[in-house]
Amino acid sequence: MAQVTMELIQELREKTGVGMMDCKKALIESDGNLEKAIEILRKKGASVAAKRAGNDAKNGLIHAYIHPGAKVGVLVEIACETDFAANTDSMRDFAKDICMQIAAANPICINQEELDKTLIEKELEIIKEQLKKTGKPENLISKIAENKLEKFYETSCLMNQKFIKNDKIAIKDLLNDLVAKIGEKIKIKRFSRFQIG
Amino acid sequence: MAQVTMELIQELREKTGVGMMDCKKALIESDGNLEKAIEILRKKGASVAAKRAGNDAKNGLIHAYIHPGAKVGVLVEIACETDFAANTDSMRDFAKDICMQIAAANPICINQEELDKTLIEKELEIIKEQLKKTGKPENLISKIAENKLEKFYETSCLMNQKFIKNDKIAIKDLLNDLVAKIGEKIKIKRFSRFQIG
């Protein structure tokens, strides 16, 4: 078993903002692997969110971003459970990042579940029809079509988008990291994005 | 005929931001009365807007306001014809005022024409029914009901609301003043107002 040093725990803590004990546990579980430990904490964030699904996220904060030139602007509501959490720097930084993300990457919705299902099925049909014409085998076509749909989600849905400041993670990972850190249910509740012309 | 002094023209110019010659004309027309001259310029603003109705307001600016505490936020799009106008201080100040207005006075729409007509007619019916019970004469009832409806518009529609910084004018007056000053078609195109809880 790899040694979980104080330095390693400190490093994980600095990277994630999660408490000392949770960092230690994650590092023991990951056998001292820092990247795996981050992954474990992220999953923990997701499970915190699931456990707290019944809790109301009645609190939160509103944040805005106007891109230089004033031709693009974004307003966002981030919901959480307590006013205490809403007033933390972590929440404010997250809200700032989400505003910048929306301004730059122009999503059409927050979660892919919001997209019209019949529209998606039709889209999938069209992709498959086009692929059939290439003469590729049936099982391959399904796989390629699914990949194309994933790409579509990645472009259109905020939660599926790659984070503009770090394309190794998606926005849902950024959110789960924050949930692991804050320990509350947190939701990107709604956004508006205005653009001139 | 009252004398239209340079001082008077200067005062009107400072109050409205409208050009020297237009201020002089308005003061001659109002016989040196400053308040009447402002009214004349405002009407001119409305007529400029009407004349330019065919022109596209494709340009503009986006502005945001987050109320201290970050529980209320507003995003607004002000449209105008040219990028030059969009970059003036007058437009920016107007956008700021409109954001503050929406944050404070919480309108449900921009123009009263956006409100559902059948809903308004039903509302008017209910008001009249209630008034009939008071035993007031029919002609008085109609008049009181219309007044109540006006009050409803004044609460609900941004353009009809009294300006929070000067309750002597409505937002439509503030807009017409700006149109008279800028000489372009200007529109409050859309807004979003988010509030926590």
Image: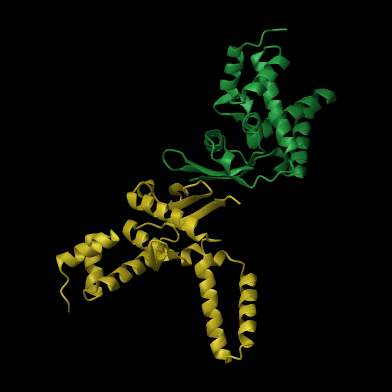
Chain colours: A yellow, B green
Compared to residue B157, the image places residue A9 above or below, namely below
Q: Is A136 or A15 nearer to us in this picture?
A: A136
Q: Number of numbered discs present?
A: 0
Compared to residue A113, the image places residue B172 above or below, namely above
Residue at 71% of width from left, 12% of height from top?
A: B31
A149 horizontally vs B138: left or right: left
Location of residue B91 in the rendering, given as x and y in whole percent from the top left corner: 56, 36
Q: Is B41 or B96 nearer to us in this picture?
A: B41
Q: Is A55 or B10 nearer to us in this picture?
A: B10
- Say which quarter of the image contains residue A32: bottom left
Residue B16 visible in rendering: yes
Which quadrant holds the N terminus of chain B?
Answer: top right
Residue at 75% of width from left, 33% of height from top?
A: B127
- Say which quarter of the image contains residue B117: top right
Residue A56 visible in rendering: no
Location of residue A73 in the rendering, given as x and y in whole percent from the top left corner: 51, 49
Location of residue A120 in the rendering, given as x and y in whole percent from the top left corner: 61, 72
- Say which quarter of the image contains residue B69: top left
Location of residue A180 in the rendering, given as x and y in whole percent from the top left corner: 33, 61
A37 horizontally vs B178: left or right: left
